[in-house]
Image: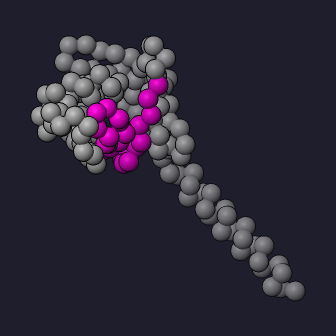
Amino acid sequence: MKVKITNPNIFTLVITLYLTLISFQESPESKILGGWKEVSCEYEKVDSFVNSDLDYRSTANFNQQLSETIIFHNAEILEFDDRESLKMHALDQTSILNWKLKGRGNILQLKNADDRMEYYEIRELTSNRLVIHFSFEMQVRGIVKMTFEKI
């Protein structure tokens, strides 16, 4: 008789403890808010080239093609605000986009004024570091890894 009463109480206690601990955890939406400065941009998992004259290690050519493909590759500073607006500051210009976190907070959706959407995978999001991966397909297939630090 006591076994039947104890099991629901233990289950309720474990669920209550779990929900309490989850409620104290900071959400991805609140972690991403604020200013971020790009500290590195790396190319990973690059396949062989269709055109052998193109070399991804010659970064000037590759960066130009990449900046035409990815919305915020040239942005040096990103500012996320709580109204889902993203200000991107490059050397001489500022752009404003809309942002939204999808999934479990691991997908960053960006939408520019032309209604063009891009999806970035958030690989790491802490209070002072943001690592984003973007899969691209140009003449090569690969992943761009962009790392930002909180400012």
115 to the left or right of 150? right
Q: Which residue is painted at 80% across and 85% down in the image?
A: 3
Quadrant in which the N terminus is drawn: bottom right
5 to the left or right of 28? right
* Rendering coords of residue 148 (x, y %): 27, 38
Give the mark count: 0
By secondary structure, the bulk of the magenta-drawn segment is best described as strand
Q: Nearer the viewer, residue 113 or 65?
A: 65
Q: Nearer the viewer, residue 66 or 104?
A: 66
88 to the left or right of 97? left
Q: Nearer the viewer, residue 93 or 133?
A: 133
Residue 124: say if magenta: yes
Q: Which residue is painted at 53% across and 46% down in the image?
A: 104
Quadrant in which the C terminus is drawn: top left
> Which image quadrant for residue 93?
top left
> Which image quadrant for residue 12?
bottom right
The figure's colour scheme reads: one colour
Q: Nearer the viewer, residue 6 or 53?
A: 53
Residue 149 seen anywhere in this rendered image of the structure: no
> Which image quadrant for residue 129?
top left
In this view, which residue lies farthest toward the right? Answer: 1
* Rendering coords of residue 11 (x, y %): 72, 71
Residue 138 seen anywhere in this rendered image of the structure: yes
What is the span of residues highlighted in magenta in the rendered image?
117-143
Q: Which residue is painted at 61% across and 62% down in the image?
A: 18
Task: Identify whether 133 is placed above or below 66.
Answer: below
Task: Identify whether 80 is placed above or below 149.
Answer: above
81 to the left or right of 51? right
Task: Identify whether 111 is placed above or below 37.
Answer: above
* Rendering coords of residue 17 (x, y %): 62, 64
